[in-house]
Image: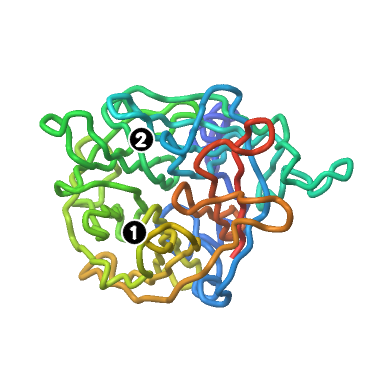
């Protein structure tokens, strides 16, 4: 039959199943088309990063469902939000004892929808403050991954997601004679509970506390890794612009020292994320860390902000200052700790949101306290 080609019902279903987390309506597609990296972009990023010097956490949490048991030593370290099939998820990484493998947990936030989540722990229930109210029962760990590289490292770190690729910073190799001291593992998200390891990149003999990951307008992939030994951040860019697979090679293109980054004193860079501006296509980086005195008597959760200039060429940074985050809002107690997990997320409408958790599960009923932070 002649005439314009039409999508069959089967083809349409296949398309939806292939990319369940990234379907956008026409207006949202138009907003993202300004920067062709295939991932999401945020609106007015530099204003968001510089207009406020203090941010407050919205009280949230999730239930462990007895599938994970984090504590001060085997603690939560990375967090990343993900959407699939109209449902909302978090990936969280947790360290283990030396000699044991770390893990990656999938959390289904069954009570939440698209966009900003807001609290799943009501401020008052029967006169009790949200510090004492547990998260919604539908917000819980649903799967745990301990195989592949998670069996070889006891400290998986910060996480990053670009489209259907999950990047994980790995350190604490059980055997450094056979495994890199630190490396970045890249997984294809086949579903929220099924990941396939497709590439691993050693971090130049250093640790890999966390990772930021994106694809540039040129088609090249870029990631950044804080190694904390000393306090440097290293950047790697893919050789070529083909789709990411097991053959993709990455080259080390830049390193910035603590003096270059200027975030503050007595800190380690716990997590890092990239954010792209929709209108300008500029790439930004946010670094989460905790300032503290050498005795640990006080702690301040902070975000350092940068513009990444010329990411496809002679990459360099423009420092945009710092923000402080209040992790103990209202009567909720401490709901996040930047020595633990932190991650940036962009909604389908281009809104930037941060998520962060505590180290362990000290929330009501053994739940994990979680913060949603809106710049």
Are there few (<14), some (14-19), or many (20+) residues within 10 Å of tag 1? many
Taking the image as shown, residue 15 lies to the left or right of residue 329, namely: left
Are there few (<14), some (14-19), or many (20+) residues within 10 Å of tag 2? many
Residue sitting at 43 percent across and 63 percent down?
Answer: 291
Residue behind mark 2 = 187
Farthest-out residue, left: 177
Percent of width and height locating residue 204: 15, 49
Asked if 244 appears above or below 28 in the picture, the reply is: above
Residue 216 tag number: 1
Percent of width and height locating residue 6: 56, 38
Query: Reading the chain from its start, which is encountered first: label 2 or label 1?
Result: 2
Residue sitting at 56 percent across and 63 percent down?
Answer: 325
Residue sitting at 67 percent across and 54 percent down?
Answer: 58
Q: Nearer the viewer, residue 326 or 85?
A: 326
Q: In terms of secondary structure, where does tag 2 sit?
A: strand
Quarter of the image with the C terminus is bottom right
Taking the image as shown, residue 374 lies to the left or right of residue 81, namely: right
Q: Nearer the viewer, residue 343 or 66?
A: 66
Percent of width and height locating residue 237: 23, 55
Color encoding of the figure? rainbow
Residue sitting at 30 percent across and 38 percent down?
Answer: 185
Taking the image as shown, residue 239 lies to the left or right of residue 74, namely: left
Farthest-out residue, right: 126
Asked if 319 appears above or below 243 in the picture, the reply is: below
Q: Nearer the viewer, residue 50 or 366?
A: 366
Q: Nearer the viewer, residue 63 or 83?
A: 63
């Amino acid at each position: 039959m002649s005439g314009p080609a039409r999508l069959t019902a089967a083809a349409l279903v296949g398309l939806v199943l292939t990319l369940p987390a990234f379907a956008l309506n026409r207006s949202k597609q138009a907003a993202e088309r300004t920067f062709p990296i295939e991932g999401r972009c945020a609106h007015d990023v530099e204003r968001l990063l510089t207009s406020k010097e203090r941010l407050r956490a919205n009280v949230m949490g999730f239930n462990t469902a007895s599938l994970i048991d984090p504590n001060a030593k085997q603690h939560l370290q990375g967090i990343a939000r993900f959407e699939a099939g109209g449902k909302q998820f978090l990936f969280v990484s947790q360290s283990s004892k030396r000699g044991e493998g770390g893990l990656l947990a999938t959390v289904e936030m069954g009570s939440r929808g698209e966009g900003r989540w807001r609290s799943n722990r009501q401020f008052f229930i029967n006169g009790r403050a949200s510090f004492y109210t547990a998260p919604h029962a539908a917000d819980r760990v649903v799967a745990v991954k301990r195989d592949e590289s998670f069996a070889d490292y006891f400290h998986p770190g910060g996480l990053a997601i670009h489209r259907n690729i999950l990047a994980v910073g790995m350190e604490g190799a059980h055997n450094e004679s056979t495994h890199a001291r630190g490396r970045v593992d890249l997984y294809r998200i086949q579903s929220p509970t099924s990941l396939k390891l497709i590439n691993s990149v050693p971090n130049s003999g250093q640790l890999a506390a966390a990772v930021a990951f994106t694809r540039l307008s040129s088609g090249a992939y870029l990631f950044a890794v804080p190694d904390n030994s000393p306090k440097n951040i290293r950047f790697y860019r893919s050789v070529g612009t083909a789709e990411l697979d097991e053959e993709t090679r990455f080259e080390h293109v830049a390193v910035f020292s603590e003096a270059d980054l200027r975030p503050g004193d007595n800190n380690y860079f716990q997590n890092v994320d990239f954010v792209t501006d929709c209108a300008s296509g500029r790439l930004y980086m946010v670094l989460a860390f905790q300032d503290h005195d050498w005795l640990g008597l006080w702690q301040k959760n902070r975000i350092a902000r940068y513009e990444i200039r010329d990411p496809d060429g002679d990459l360099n940074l423009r420092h945009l200052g710092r923000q402080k985050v209040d992790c103990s809002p209202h009567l909720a107690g401490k709901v996040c700790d930047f020595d633990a997990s932190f991650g940036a997320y962009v909604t389908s409408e281009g809104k930037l949101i941060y998520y962060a958790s505590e180290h362990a599960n000290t929330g009501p009923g053994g739940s994990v306290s979680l913060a949603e932070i809106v710049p």
